[in-house]
Image: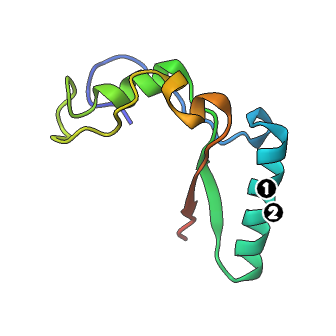
């Protein structure tokens, strides 16, 4: 995930136990519904650290490429991920 800065890249967390409890239960229910419908959905990212949010914010600003910004939230406190109330769900490809 690094853009060549030479620094260790913060790790993405997909640990659902770090989410707000009612939200985590809703995410699990949604994942189960996806699986029942034949979709292999997984949570790629859940709770986001300030360090990772700062890296995302720098992309497209001080880290090139990408040439376009990734997020407008400079802090994880300006993102639902920072409160354990957002997840990024993707399809697991084989």
Residue beneath the point at 75% across and 33% down = 18
Between the residue at mark 1 and the residue at mark 2, the CA separation in whole angstroms equals 5 Å
**Residue 30 is at least partly visible in this image:** yes
Could you say which is closer to the camera, residue 59 or residue 7?
59
Left or right: 63, with 17 as reference point: left
**Image x and y of residue 31, in percent:** 73, 64
**Quadrant in the picture for the C terminus:** bottom right
- The answer to whether residue 9 shows anywhere in this view is no
Which residue is rendered at x = 65% and y = 42% of the image? 14
Q: Which mark is residue 75?
A: none
Horizontal side of residue 24 vs 12, given as left or right: right
Q: Are marks 1 and 2 in contact (CB under 8 Å)?
A: yes
SS of the residue under disc 2: helix
- Compared with 7, 47 (above or below) is below
* x, y percent for residue 82: 59, 28
Give the residue number, with chain letter if any, for mark 1: 26
Mark 2 burial class by Cα count in 10 Å: few <14, some 14-19, many 20+: few
Locate residue 23, reporting x and y percent. Answer: 77, 46
- Residue at 39% from the left image edge and 36% from the top image edge: 1
Identify the element where label 1 is drawn.
helix
Q: Which residue is mark 2?
A: 29
Does 83 sit above or below residue 28? above
**Disc 1 residue crowd, few under 14, some 14–19, many 20+, Cα 10 Å:** few
């Amino acid at each position: 995930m690094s853009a060549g800065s030479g620094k260790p890249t913060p790790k993405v967390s997909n640990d659902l136990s770090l989410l707000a409890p009612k939200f985590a239960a809703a995410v699990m229910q949604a994942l189960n519904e996806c699986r029942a419908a034949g979709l292999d959905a997984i949570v790629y990212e859940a709770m986001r650290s300030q360090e990772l949010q700062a890296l995302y914010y720098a992309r497209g600003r001080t880290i090139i490429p990408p040439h376009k910004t990734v997020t407008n939230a400079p802090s994880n406190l300006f993102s639902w991920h920072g409160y354990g109330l957002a997840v990024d769900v993707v399809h697991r490809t084989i």
